[in-house]
Amino acid sequence: MTNKIESVDWHEPFAVFLELLLNPVGIEVLSEIQVMSKPPRADILLLRNVGPHTEEQRQRLCDAVRDSEANHIFIEFKYSETITEAHLAKAPAYGIFYRESKKLKSSEVDTFIVSSKTPSSKLIEDAGYRWAEEGVLRSEIPVFRMTPIISLNDLPNTPHNLLFKVFASKLKQKRLAFDKIKDRRADVMSGELSALIIGLQKIMLSKEFEMATETITSEEIKRIGMAWAERMMQDIPVEKRLEGVPLEERLKGVPLEERLKGVPLEELLKGVPAGDILAAIEGRLNEDISGEDLSKLLRKKSGRNR
């Protein structure tokens, strides 16, 4: 199968993916940024943060970006395009114009190109790039020095890189990333992000979406993911779904009367001091109320003491 799905504008789901991943830890994600007081607008993302990245934020950012000390980080994302020298020259210009329009210092703005495809060896050589670390290219030529390249195919499979590597172009890298991030869903994924990831997996790895002709948005991808997750859940036994879920979480929203329905009276009264039982009976006898109301009171007392 091919990995190129023409009906998806990959910049949009990538932007939504970063919003859902990073906004919860205090990194603001903006797309289609106006880099000057007037057009042009850049088809890139801006990550804004106050101060150095916290450890929690670093766990959600890929290599190179996580080590940036800038408060404003531009990311130009290339999914189906192969990087050219024109891209390398244009990307830092966005950062420069933005910096000047906002009156920021050069140290406050960084720019990265994140590429699904591995850049060609000719481009690497001609633009003076070298592999500074696994998956990260940096150039010593002044015009390109401001634009490190992050190659998603070549990033190491460390936990903080895996969420980004689902956008890699190589099928093997995608499959590995999707397989491994299942272990991270509990600690970083909201319901929306999880649905988006599942939808991306279904679209990127399934042949049935190759011939899609209508434009697929991030909302549609999330709907696909949610529907797929619901179908999968139906095949999992209830006890398996609840495995590891604390009792108080299972009972959230269940009224006390429902929780105690069918429990024998002697079980309800276990652990309730005899004095409390007698006091309740005496109080209700004095008020001359029905046995049904007395039973409710005993159930409530039992529920508080259990």
Image: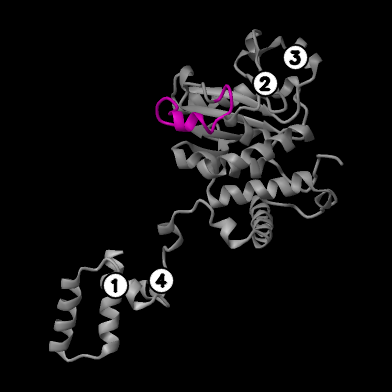
The quarter in which the N terminus is drawn is top right
Q: Which element carries disc 1, helix, strand or loop?
A: loop
Q: Nearer the viewer, mark 4 or mark 3?
A: 4
Q: Nearer the viewer, mark 1 or mark 4?
A: 1
Q: At 24% from the left edge and 68% from the top edge, which residue is drawn?
A: 272
The quarter in which the C terminus is drawn is bottom left
Label ID, residue 124: 3
The answer to the question of whether label 2 and label 4 lie on touching residues, with beta carbons closer than 8 A, is no
| Of the image marks 4 and 3, the number of the one nearer the N terminus | 3
Instruction: Please give the residue where the numbered disc 2 appears in the rendered image.
Output: 135
Q: At 25% from the left edge and 91% from the top edge, which residue is drawn?
A: 290
User: Is residue 15 shown to the viewer in this render?
Assistant: no
**Highlighted range, magenta:** 49-65
Mark 3: give few (<14), some (14-19) or many (20+) Cα within 10 Å.
Answer: some
Instruction: Please give the residue where the numbered disc 1 appears in the rendered image.
Output: 269
Instruction: Please give the residue where the numbered disc 4 appears in the rendered image.
Output: 259
| Of the image marks 1 and 3, the number of the one nearer the N terminus | 3
